[in-house]
Image (cartoon, rainbow, N blue to C red):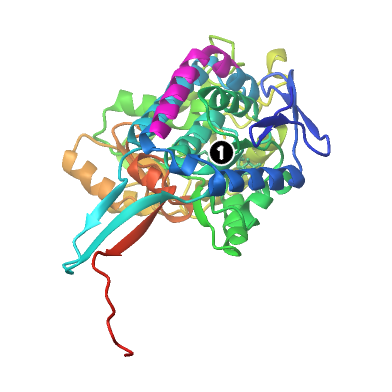
Amino acid sequence: MPDLFIDGEWRSAVDEGTREIRCPADGSLVGVVDEAGGKDTVEAIAAARRAFDDGPWPHTAPDQRGDLLLRVADLLLRDKDALARAESLDTGKRLVESAYDIDDIANCFRYFGRTAASETGRVVDTGTEGVDSRVVYEPVGVCALITPWNYPLLQTAWKVAPALAAGNTFILKPSELTPHTAIHLMRLLEEAGVPAGVANLILGAGPEAGAPLSDHPDVDLVSFTGGLQTGRRLMAAAAGTVKKVALELGGKNPNVVFADADFDTAVDMALTAVFLHSGQVCSAGARLLVEDSLHDRFVDEVVRRASEIRLGGPFDERAQTGPLISQAHRTKVEAYVAKGLEEGAVLRCGGARPDGAGFADGFYYLPTVLDERTAGMSVVQDESFGPVLTVERFSSEDEAVRLANNTIYGLAGAVWTSDEARAARVAGRLRIGTVWINDYHPYVPQAEWGGFKQSGFGRELGPAGLAEYREPKHIWRNTNPAPQGWFA
Ligand code: NAD
């Protein structure tokens, strides 16, 4: 069955392109999918444009749009096992994590299903006799939704659910490395009754299948999650037609531990913060900042436990984390570590591929700790997006904040302390979109997600996430029109 979904039909690519998808854990063939070129993308844009300009979806009552999203949430849970398995095969992620993600994804559809009808308008008190005036919220139009490979369906849900809730039509382009759950989602949208042309799926590489999405005049909004360099390129391409742009980019997230933190919990969560999904998490706590007096004891324990982390494939129930997504990505992580060592980092553990036949065909890399880093070095500035933790020391609250903020990114991070007043002060001074206090990684669809500085532009979740996909329009009605006679 063909894999591109355009104008309510499943199609193959016009130039018959295909791509093999292989599991990063062992190189086994997961499937062969259709791969679009630019012509397919332009057709998908035209279908989304027609569905927006002439179709029923933008004018469907918001609560009916919400009902469709709630049906999709139920279908996602019905197909949870198959979706989790597909996600794990494409990404190499542990099955238990993928299953957890599907629950999150269903919650996201449920949240936007329930809030679809919110903020449909407000009356404005103009103080002018004979006038009524109101602001209504309308869909932006045709949305290009471009997603990465690390949380393929979750990142997709964060865009598809609010875009549909607001009444837009869209073209989804998932990462070329992880297409299978996006295909499954489109089948569920079809089953839930989404009208033809509202939801379109293009598979393929960024420069070929994706590029028309950011400069085509019929696209109104580009919502992108991915790397900083790609985000900059898309923002520049979108400028030609002044598209709305929403960007969720990288992070170099500080995990700040004061000496009065709960030691066992802070150590445990420092490991989760950075080694979950082998560090391939935009909000990964890849920079550990530890108060001087605690440094040696804390880092020794992190290193001891990091050295014992068990690697394995998605269906290995003993594995605690899995492989990197591709050979190219592992090469990038290796180069990043080599640069850190050149700059004088102290390698405390990892820094190599694991030994053993079981790892030979996958893209594994050992959990790595680079100690004695100082601000300004490349390894504390650049995102590795791998299982690599850098450690910096600080000796005062001011220094902790200064070091934590010393990056071009501003996505997320944490502060660990038993002093509530200090936690509040530091949280207030960190220039990041999400601050966890004595915790790491949780998020909820009700709260906004997005980055300060070069981590992003716009918001994904919560009311502000929905607002990204809506345009406020002011409607002024003269209730008693009559000539004014200015030019009589
Ligand atoms: P990437 O930028 O390489 O690719 C992301 C997507 O963009 C893919 O679908 C790719 O095909 C597409 N793309 C590439 N060039 C394009 C072009 N010219 N036109 C249109 N589309 C194009 O990123 P990646 O390697 O897939 O993902 C990893 C990055 O994503 C990391 O930097 C990570 O921090 C970031 N990320 C951020 C968040 C967040 O919420 N801020 C969440 C997840 C991942």
Q: Determine if the magenta segment contains residue 77.
A: yes
Residue under pointer 1: 198
Q: Is residue 197 magenta?
A: no
What x and y, as percent, mark residue 408?
47, 55
Residue 50 is at least partly visible in this image: yes
Taking the image in four quarters, ligand 1 sits in the one at top right
Quadrant in which the N terminus is drawn: top right
Whether 402 is drawn above or below 352: the answer is below
- Whether residue 299 appears in this view of the structure is no
Q: Is 426 situated above or below 418?
A: below
What's the residue at 33%, 60% (across, down)?
475
Residue at 33% x, 90% y is 487
Given residues 387 and 23, the one toward you in this image is 23
Q: Name above or below for residue 472 compared with residue 35.
A: below
SS of the residue under disc 1:
loop
The C terminus sits in image quarter: bottom left
Would you say the magenta stretch is mainly helix, strand or loop?
A: helix
Q: Residue furthest top?
A: 317
Side of 427 where 145 appears, left or right = right
Identify which residue, 245 or 225, lies in the foreground.
Answer: 245
How packed mark 1 is, by other alpha carbons closer than 10 Å (few <14, some 14-19, many 20 or more), is many
Q: Say which amino acid is labelled 1.
A: Val
Residue at 60% x, 43% y is 341
Residue at 34% from the left image edge and 31% from the top image edge: 114
Magenta segment boundaries in residue numbering: 64-85
Taking the image as shown, residue 123 lies to the left or right of residue 383, namely: left
**Residue 355, percent across and down?**
68, 19
Viewer-nearest residue: 105 or 372: 105
